[in-house]
Image: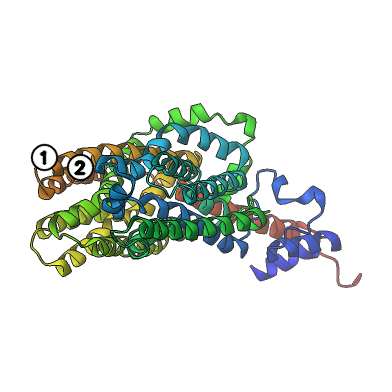
Amino acid sequence: MGEKQAQEDARLSPEDLENHVKLEAGDASTLPGDQTPEDGHGAPQQTRLYKRRWLIVFLFSSYSMCNSYQWIQYGIIGNIFMRFYGVDAFTIDWLSMIYMLTYIPLIFPVTWLLDRKGLRVIALVGTALNCTGTWIKVVSVRPDLFPVTFLGQFCSSLAQVFILGMPSKIASVWFGSEEVSTACSIGVFGNQLGCAIGFLLPPILVPNVNDMDELANHIRTMFYITAGVATFLFILVVFVFQERPKLPPTQAQATARRIPPEEYSYTASILRLLRNKPFVLLIISYGLNVGCYYAIGTLLNRMIIDQYPDEEVNAGRIGLTIVIAGMVGSLICGVWLDRTKTYKQTTLAVYIMALVGMIVYAATLKQGQLWVVFITAGSLGFFMTGYLPLGFEFAAELTYPESEGTSSGLLNCSAQVFGIIFTICQGKIIDKFNTLAGNIFLCVFLLVGSIMTGLIKSDLRRQNANRLAKEEAEKRMLEQDYGATAQISSQPKTPPSQT
């Protein structure tokens, strides 16, 4: 191969040889204007990975964390906010469920905006709304201003619509085919870390004191901290967040870039996705799993206080345990997928283990041993929360070359619908019967989701596209080497006397 390459290089002009070396070295930025990778004439395009990709995904993960923290900051100390604002438990539950409700009608226009305007616009709008919501809450710390605090939570819930569907999109736009699952896991990691902080900090920052003025000061301090962090992250996004790299990271992303915007129809894309039977099964099964997680997170304070009175701080720590274990599970699953590409097998195994974890958690909650609840809740979180990035990446595989933002949006929409249904139903079951009956209710639907996951056909379209692109590139190289050898061998030999 080395001799053939040398023979081919010998026939190139000095300028052509220089450009050829640049391509081999991965430096496409200095090619002449008429030889840019985008002008490949059917040949595989030049790809490149930029170090900046890690800054982008960690910045996204940070502001996703700030937003998801607010989802649970009321619910985990719901009994305290009930007393401060003078409202009932169901009203406090809506401060969490508003996150789910706003997502359902708005995800489709936001996904359309993501496809049309790109990642940077979505990031700016999301962080701006998140920042606005936190400052509205700062001025709502009075017992008669519950509508104002609800308005602030509503603004934060609007920001979530611009955040939840982005991990897989950022992963595909910035990362190589061997990194997409890990990158997606890091993006989801921020959301989970925010939930963990939301379970941990509010019970510490807002203790259950009797003096209303002192309680108001504690709540105001918590809101000021959140607003400061949200403002700092918004400024970072304005100056740091970049739309996309100059060169695509994979051949699959290069192909997606070549599709003209006018040829893309968002409505047609959704219709194609809804005709994709494996993806429809994933939409429902994903919604069942994540909907159960939303219900558990929203009602955790009520479940723990019911069995262990005056344990608000430990209720938050149990929630923290669930999420931290899930974060570990997410990262492990992401790395595992990048190495093995066993999407269906991994998704099904994690789903079944989430069902087993839910059964064990439900059975041990009433045993009177809080340390046992910590262990069983952690095992539940490892698999149930660890499932989140698996669903995103499996969807991206099943639906390529459709936009990852669209597929992620449909998954999250399903999760929000089931989250509202499960939260309301489980809350009513707990009130009428007991906590065990509410948890059994969730176990039934996790069983249904496990069966549906087993029925999904594993059609890994994105992996197949990358594999075919690599094979095509290798084929072209072989053809070039063969052509060069044939041309040299066909040239007449020079007689020794003329030499």
Does residue 160 sit above or below 382 in this rendering?
A: above
| Position of residue 50 measured from the top left corner of the image (x, y, whole percent) | 63, 62
Quarter of the figure with the C terminus: bottom right
The structure residue drawn at horizontal position 25% and vertical position 60%, both measured from the top left corner, is: 312
**How far apart are labels 1 and 2 at the CA level?**
9 Å
Q: What is the crowding at mark 2: few (fewer than 14 residues within 10 Å), some, or many (at least 20)? A: many
| Position of residue 204 measured from the top left corner of the image (x, y, whole percent) | 34, 65
What secondary structure is marked by label 1? helix
Residue closer to the observer: 61 or 169: 61
Q: What residue sits right under mark 2 in the picture?
A: 427
The structure residue drawn at horizontal position 38% and vertical position 57%, both measured from the top left corner, is: 213
| Position of residue 153 measured from the top left corner of the image (x, y, whole percent) | 43, 44
| Position of residue 321 measured from the top left corner of the image (x, y, whole percent) | 28, 64
Marks 1/2 in contact by CB < 8 Å: the verdict is: no
Residue closer to the observer: 421 or 186: 421
Q: Is residue 176 visible?
A: no
Q: What residue sits right under mark 1 in the picture?
A: 432
Q: Amino acid at mark 1?
A: Lys
Q: Residue 455 sits in which quadrant?
A: top left
Q: Amino acid at mark 2?
A: Gly
Using residue 325 as the reference point, say whether residue 179 is left or right of it.
right
Does residue 9 sit above or below 137 in this rendering?
A: below
Q: Residue 336 sits in which quadrant?
A: bottom left
